[in-house]
């Protein structure tokens, strides 16, 4: 048990001491693959003051889980379920259109699980029995 605890502490220390590298707007992928990428804009919630107009602070982003584009490419949605919000943005201007607020509990219809389930696992979730 001591070895496991030590390894957990070491892994925790290692993950918290790693330098975070922020990629600059305009950075392009390297290599000669079929697809190339360029960072042209960023929505983030870690720096309110930025040096590039395309690097914008967005309070609706709280531990984002995914980004989904509409089929026609006109809008994109940033899902921040821990923040109980989904931000809706215009894909051509990157401007926020609206915020969809979520409340996941048994008293509303905005359910995370279907058919009154409380878990996707084969065991109780959050201490439910």
Image (cartoon, rainbow, N blue to C red):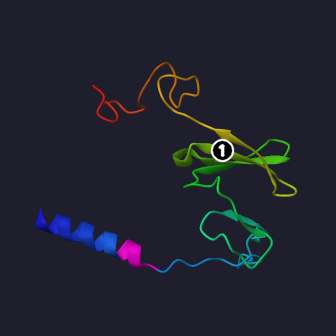
**Magenta span: chief secondary structure:** helix
Which residue is situated farthest in the left direction here?
1
Q: Is residue 13 above or below residue 74?
A: below
Q: Is residue 13 left or right of residue 86?
A: left
The residue under label 1 is 86
Measuring 63% from the left and 71% from the top, which residue is drawn there? 47
Q: Is residue 59 above or below residue 24?
A: above
- Please state which of residues 56 and 79 is positioned toward the viewer in this rendering: 56
The residue at 41%/31% (across/down) is 119
The image position of residue 19, as x and y in percent, is 48, 80
- Quarter of the image containing the C terminus? top left
Is residue 37 inside the magenta stretch? no
Q: Badge 1, how many Cα within 10 Å: few under 14, some, many 20+?
A: many
Kindly identify the residue that appears in the image at 39 percent across and 73 percent down. 16
Q: In this rendering, would 35 be left or right of 82?
A: right
The answer to which of 4 and 108 lies nearer the viewer is: 108
> What residue do we see at 51% from left, 32% from top?
104
Span of residues in magenta = 14-18
Return the x and y of residue 113 as percentages of the image width and height: 50, 28
Tell me residue 13's x, y (percent): 32, 74
1 lies left or right of 43: left
């Amino acid at each position: 048990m001591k070895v496991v605890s030590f390894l957990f502490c070491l892994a925790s220390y290692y993950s918290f001491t790693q330098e975070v590298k922020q990629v600059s707007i305009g950075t392009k992928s390297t290599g000669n693959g079929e697809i190339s990428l360029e960072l042209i804009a960023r929505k983030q919630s870690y720096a309110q003051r930025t040096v590039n107009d395309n690097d914008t602070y967005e309070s609706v982003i709280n531990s984002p889980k995914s980004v989904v584009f509409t089929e026609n490419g006109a809008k994109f949605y940033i899902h921040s379920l821990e923040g109980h919000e989904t931000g809706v943005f215009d894909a051509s201007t990157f401007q926020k259109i609206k915020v969809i607020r979520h409340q996941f509990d048994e008293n509303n219809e905005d359910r995370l699980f279907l058919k009154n389930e409380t878990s996707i696992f084969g065991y109780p979730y959050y201490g439910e029995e």
